[in-house]
C-alpha cells in the first residue's frame, strides 16, 4: 500500500475515533454523560461520512500516477476527517454548557457537505486537466 493509501485508510478511521475521544473528554469533564450506545452511534454516524469518502478517494487514487495527483486524490477523505477530529476534541476539552453534545448531531451534517464540495472540486480538477493523472 502506498503512503497515500495508508493515509486514506487512517482518514477513514480518524473521524469516528476522534468523535468518540471527544465524547469521552466531554464526559470526563462532567458536562454531559455519554453512554456506551452513544459511542456506537457516534462511530456509525461519522463512518457514514468517511467510508464513502475513502471509497471515492481510493478510486481516484488508483487512477493517479503522479505525486501531486495522488495527494489531491485523498483530500475528500483527509480534509473532513482531520477538521472534524480537531473540532470534536476541541469541543470535548471545552464543551458548550448551554447545549452540551449538540455538535455530535450538527457537525456530521456540515462535514458531509464539506466532503461533497471537496469531492466535486477534486473531480473538477481532474476533468479539466488542471491536475493530470500523471502530474
Image (cartoon, rainbow, N blue to C red):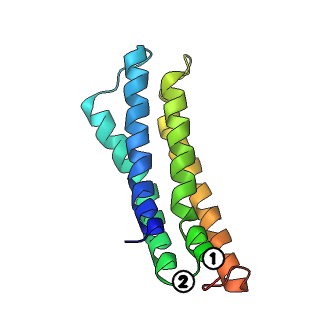
Q: Residues within 10 Å of mark 2 (few under 14, many from 20)?
A: few
Q: Label 1, on which residue?
A: 123
User: Which residue is located at x 35 percent, y 20 percent?
Assistant: 33
- Judge whether 36 appears above or below 9 on screen: above
Residue that appears at 44% across and 32% down = 22
Vertical relation: 104 (above or below) 75 = above
Name the residue: 58% across, 75% down.
67
Residue 65 circle label: 2
* Category of crowding for the residue at label 1, using alpha-carbon neighbours closer than 10 angstroms: few (below 14), some (14–19), many (at least 20): some
User: Which residue is the extreme one toward the left?
Assistant: 36
Point out residue 106 in the picture as x, y percentages from the top left corner: 54, 40
Which numbered disc covers residue 38? none
Helix or strand or loop: what does disc 2 sit on?
Answer: loop
**Which residue is nearer to you in this view: 115 or 68?**
68
For the N terminus, the quadrant is: bottom left
Tell me the quarter of the image containing the C terminus.
bottom right
- Taking the spot 60% from the left edge, 76% from the top edge, the residue there is 69
Which of these two is toward me, 57 or 52? 57
Q: Is residue 17 visible?
A: yes
Q: Is residue 48 visible?
A: no
Q: Secondary structure at mark 1?
A: helix
How far across and down, in percent of the image, does residue 50 sit?
A: 44, 57
Amino acid at each position: 500500500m502506498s503512503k497515500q493509501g495508508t493515509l486514506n485508510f487512517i482518514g477513514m478511521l480518524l473521524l469516528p475515533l476522534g468523535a468518540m475521544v471527544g465524547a469521552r473528554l466531554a464526559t470526563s469533564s462532567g458536562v454531559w454523560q455519554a453512554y456506551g450506545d452513544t459511542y456506537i452511534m457516534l462511530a456509525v454516524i461519522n463512518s457514514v461520512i468517511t467510508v464513502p469518502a475513502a471509497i471515492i478517494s481510493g478510486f481516484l487514487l488508483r487512477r493517479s500516477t503522479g505525486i501531486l495527483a495522488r495527494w489531491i486524490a485523498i483530500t475528500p477523505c483527509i480534509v473532513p476527517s482531520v477538521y472534524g477530529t480537531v473540532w470534536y476534541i476541541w469541543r470535548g476539552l471545552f464543551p458548550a454548557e448551554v447545549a452540551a453534545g449538540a455538535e455530535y448531531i450538527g457537525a456530521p451534517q456540515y462535514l458531509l457537505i464539506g466532503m461533497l464540495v471537496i469531492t466535486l472540486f477534486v473531480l473538477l480538477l481532474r476533468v479539466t486537466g488542471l491536475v493530470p493523472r500523471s502530474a
